[in-house]
Amino acid sequence: MGHDSKQISVLGLGAMGAAIARAWLAAGYETTVWNRTASRAEPLVAEGAKAAATAAEAVAASGLVIVCLLDDASVGEALADADLTGKGLVNITTGTPGDARERAGWAAERGARYLDGGIMAVPPMIGVPESGAYVFYSGSPELFAEHRDALGVPAAAKYVGEDAGSAALHDVALLSAMTSMFAGMAHAFALTRGATSPKEFAPLLIEWLTAMAGGADGMAEHLESGDYTLGVTSNLAMMVQGNRTLLRTAEEQGVSPELLTPFMALMERRLADGHPDEGTTGVVDLLLRGA
């Protein structure tokens, strides 16, 4: 697009939007900002940003428009009066894959190319190359290719496909795994509460979970091959037996087993279905059946 390749508009200046706008400013991009509460733009204007009075004005200022608002409904409201013809719209507002696909269709009807983004970082990691921050992007491959350099400024950019919902799906899948990991941490700290120093226990927990995370490779191999017994050392029959000790220990320690029992129940069902030599991969099939 030549003339506006270093021009970017950022709509939404919450902690994340402001961090992203700041990263582009620092990299020499002509950055136009808009926020519903206009005072949020003042610190960025002091750093060289241009404040737009309306969202439509912010959209008009640049070929590449980044939207980082509260939710999907806010995106529709903010852009209701904007002329999106010929624009590159990059929506990094947190939402579901379904939200992203609907918003991509909505953008196409208004003449814009669309990318949806899932940010795998917290605001302090933005604009810090060594932080490991990255953003999943999905949608228009042309738009991503054209603005790859700009998109890589606040955080590394990972393109995960033309389906606009793919970025949100990747984002939520990783967050869901994290949620269950934190559940496991909470249970472990509850078990050891009063018996050992949490600060002494934490490094053991980190080391163990880091080592166990490699199990994802084995599950992936099972799912790709269809053989859930490949390379299994602790099989389902052994693990279900071992679960009893986990539950009895929780009872002895006066700890609720509620974070463990849903997964254990799925393991028992898979075993009862006749799969004693598998690992835990078969649980995936139970979840997919919605059973």
Image: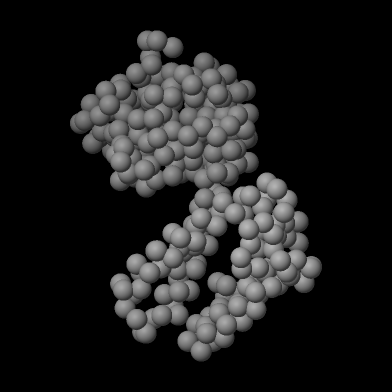
Q: Which corner quadrant holds the C terminus?
A: bottom right
Which quadrant of the structure image shows residue 135? top left
The residue depicted at 68 percent of the width and 50 percent of the height is 223
The residue depicted at 73 percent of the width and 51 percent of the height is 226
Q: Which corner quadrant holds the N terminus?
A: top left
The residue depicted at 71 percent of the width and 66 percent of the height is 277
Which quadrant of the structure image shows residue 48? top left
Camera-side residue: 276 or 56?
276
Establish if 213 lies above or below 49: below
Establish if 210 lies above or below 10: below
The residue depicted at 40 percent of the width and 10 percent of the height is 2
Residue 89 rendering spot, x and y as whole percentages: 49, 26
Residue 42 rendering spot, x and y as whole percentages: 25, 35
Answer left or right for 102 relative to 133: right
Q: Residue furthest right?
A: 273
Establish if 129 lies above or below 229: above
Q: Residue furthest bottom?
A: 252
Residue 215 rendering spot, x and y as whole percentages: 55, 57
